[in-house]
Image (cartoon, rainbow, N blue to C red):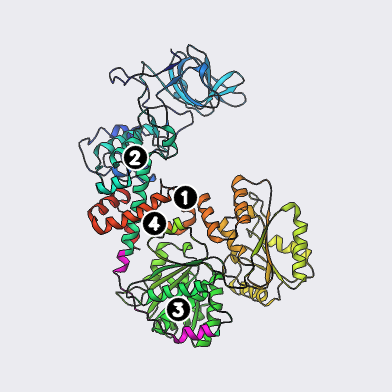
Amino acid sequence: MPRTSKKGAPDSKSVSTNSASFTGGVKAAKPSGDAVASSLTRATDSTDDSLQFVTPAVRERLARLGIFRLADLVLHLPLRYEDETTLVAIADAVSGTSVQVEGKVVETKVEFRPRRQLVCRIEDDSGTLTMRFFNFYPSQQRALATGARVRLIGEIRQGFFGAEMIHPRFRTLRVEVPLPDALTPVYPTTAGLSQDSLRKLVARALRDTDLSETLPEPIRQQIGLEPFVDAVRLLHQPPQQVDAVSLQERTHSAWQRLKFDELLAQQLSMRLHYQRRSRQRAPVLRSHSGLPRQLAESLPFGLTGAQLRTLDEIRGDLARPHPMQRLLQGDVGSGKTIVAALSALQAIESGYQVAVMAPTEILAEQHYRKFAHWLVPLGIEVAWLSGSVRKKERDEALEQLASGNTTLAIGTHALFQEQVVFRNLGLAIIDEQHRFGVRQRLMLRMKGAAKNAQPHQLMMSATPIPRTLAMSFYADLDVSVIDELPPGRTPVVTKLVADSRRDEVLARVRDACASGRQAYWVCPLIEESEALQLQTAMDTYERLQREFSELKIGLVHGRMRSAEKAAVMDAFQSGTVQLLVATTVIEVGVDVPNASLMVIEHAERMGLSQLHQLRGRVGRGAQSSACILLYQSPLSELARERLRIIYENSDGFEVARLDLKLRGPGEILGARQSGVPMLRFADLESDIKLLETARSVAADLVASHPDLVECHLTRWLGGRQEYLRV
């Protein structure tokens, strides 16, 4: 055998192998994907986009991958590619690289030291190589019998007995098998669905699916994109001479076309959703000066320019006969709540009711206290609804809401329960909106002011949304940004302290409380977890009581009864409690200006958004404030990077941008993704120019090419764009 060889196209009459594809050494779930291959022989003349030609079991496995149509297979793109076009002589294989070799089995045996394993030695004209399988089937042992000719792919490493491969992919050759003339795609798959079966299915999809262009030719040429059919065929069947690095890094022009089309589908769906909403009816809530002016004059502070600007944007939306869906975002402490309260007064003065919903009881209760403090003196009744409200009080509140006597209701998800009836709901304010699912927000919207009208929605988020995320996943919303902090806020100093220096932190807490200030001590868990070995809030509370016998210490966590939490929070806000030990239930909504120090246990375990939100609980007064992040070594690379980002950045928008870069949009969006098409190929950090172009093209297509819009959305979303109607 030559040391390096390339062979011509296969002659179908001369090819005979015992397997349709390379066989992996690791045990595979049964049954294999061979059922797919056999099913391909049926209904070959069908042009139906469905997958009825495969067995129900295979359809179920494809469904796990999000594949329901042949068109979905076209867009099921490879994760990576393997070069099976070249054979490397065993003696020339470089350690640490993945190579393909071919040789004859000279010995196969099962060894039991140090553990049961199948050991197979093969040789070619240049040398010998050992294969090891720690998990194997008897059929694999039989296939690797002495004398068999095998072709295998894997990473070469130097073992005690020379070159070896651990669990390589292999196939046995009964006759000489020519090498392929293209790179081999490797697809995302699931148990029971082999790569070879997926390749056959994709080949059929490329043959039978409509791959016609969905971009007008002048636009495609102006942007400089490849034709869709050329791009998708190249990605599934890349020729040998293609730049493998650009394919792997997804910078090849074919990848650019698919990324653009994906971003365009998202932009089109968001734009159509926005247009559909503009055709729906909503109550006209005209701007009045009475109650909002009275509230503004009673405040001990003035509104910032950013607050006034966003308030004007909201007031303009509320006065239109179409439902507002505006996202009000701003960093922690920027003053979103007062903007929401002034917006609520516009609805109330217009004769409508307002609902304010928050994801946690402690945050909802904070809103209730603030709104009641501001609005009750103006003669406005405020109802409180949560799961912990007693039945008698709850029934009274429900009756007052149904009659219209109560114009403002504040609560948790209890607000959208079936028994909650509003007489004329005109505005729904949803705080920390990303924690609610699409369907939950829809249920609150359905409690609208009239049968054929929807209430306006104002969504708030203290988690700043990076510009790229706002341009893509929030493109169906109008966004207002409070980008200015109220005067008098002092920057919070962030310190990273190893757990071994805990005594220094305790001394810092003692000094702060002795000088008349207050402090938080935040713990991530309530009960002990042996697996994570995290310090619990209860243990910390008991230990700090022993450490600070001279201080009044409070404890609050999510499993406490509402009345207990309220009592502790009241004591902390009044200054009776000097040190508050808490879980992350205080992440949002807590406002105690005298609290100037926060200690966060196991900061390495928390996400960037959570750390930034917690840090925002201090620095609300005139005195200097600090947030101490206690961490345990050793740190993972991800934890080290998170701590570096939160230490170096105090701007919430920059923290959010870097968080998006670390985690991607899926995790950050949370529940919202249940109604929004997620991105599989495009990257919001590196593909920003493609996103901006897609936004521009989407506007043109919707205005001038509705037929192509429908074709493009059908190709990329199928029937899933219907979710966007909620």
Mark 2 to mark 1: distance in Å?
A: 36 Å
| For the residues bearing labels 3 and 2, Cβ distance under 8 angstroms | no
Could you tell me which residue is drawn at 36 percent across and 52 percent down?
A: 693
Question: Which residue in the protein does label 3 denote?
Answer: 344
Instruction: Provide residue 436's location: percent of width, then percent of height.
Output: 46, 63
Question: Which residue in the protein does label 1 denote?
Answer: 685
| Residue 43 visible in rendering | yes
Q: Where, by quadrant of the figure, is residue 634 drawn?
A: top right
Mark 3 to mark 4: distance in Å?
A: 28 Å
Q: SS of the residue at dot 2?
A: helix
Mark 2 to mark 4: distance in Å?
A: 27 Å
The magenta-colored residue range is: 275-297
- Magenta span has 644? no
- Magenta span has 278? yes
Circle nearer the N terminus (3, 4) = 3
As rendered, which of 321 and 429 lies closer to the eye?
A: 321
Instruction: Provide residue 642's location: percent of width, then percent of height.
Output: 59, 52
As displayed, is residue 377 above or below residue 32? below
Mark 3 to mark 2: distance in Å?
A: 53 Å
Q: State the mark number for residue 58.
A: 2
Instruction: Provide residue 274's location: percent of width, then percent of height.
Output: 33, 64
Question: Which residue in the protein does label 4 denote?
Answer: 676
Q: SS of the residue at dot 3?
A: helix
Instruction: Give the crowd class for mark 1: few <14, some 14-19, many >=20 residues within 10 Å.
Output: some
Mark 1 to mark 4: distance in Å?
A: 19 Å
Instruction: Give the crowd class for mark 2: few <14, some 14-19, many >=20 residues within 10 Å.
Output: many
Circle nearer the N terminus (1, 4) = 4
| For the residues bearing labels 1 and 4, Cβ distance under 8 angstroms | no
As rendered, which of 713 and 124 lies closer to the eye?
A: 713
Q: Quadrant of the C terminus?
A: bottom left
